[in-house]
Image: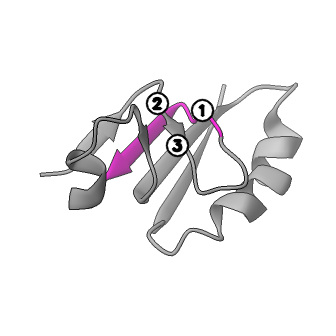
Amino acid sequence: MPLLALDHYYSPLPFFYYPDVAVSCDEQDRNTAEDFICYPRLIGEVLSPTTAAFDRGDKFADYRTSESLQEYVLINE
């Protein structure tokens, strides 16, 4: 069963973010005492005028370095 994380940050060092929604199906994220996930399968971001360029650009480039990520969903506010 997927692990849904709301208000939990995604942390593949050397950066971390607090996505609006993150889903992990990896047992390594389920079996930890940490309040963040390292192996997201899906990340969702709600775009606003102040964050849209960063969410589409540099943040997306960082997220793409995750081998587990399969979907990145952007939702216009």
Of mark 2 and mark 3, the one earlier in the sequence is 2
Q: Is disc 3 placed on a helix, strand or loop?
A: strand
Under mark 3, the amino acid is Gly
| Image x and y of residue 23, in percent | 35, 47
Per the rendering, the mark at residue 8 is 2
Residue 32 located left or right of residue 1: right
**Stretch in magenta:** 17-25
Task: Tell me the quarter of the picture where residue 6 sits.
Answer: top left
Under mark 1, the amino acid is Tyr
Q: In front: 17, or 55?
A: 17
Per the rendering, the mark at residue 44 is 3
Q: Residues within 10 Å of mark 2 (few under 14, many from 20)?
A: some
**CA distance for labels 1 and 3:** 10 Å
Under mark 2, the amino acid is His
Residue 25 located left or right of residue 7: left
- Circle 2/circle 1 CB separation < 8 Å: yes
| Image x and y of residue 7, in percent | 47, 24
Residue 35 colored in magenta in the image: no
Q: Is disc 2 placed on a helix, strand or loop?
A: loop
x 87%, y 25%: residue: 50
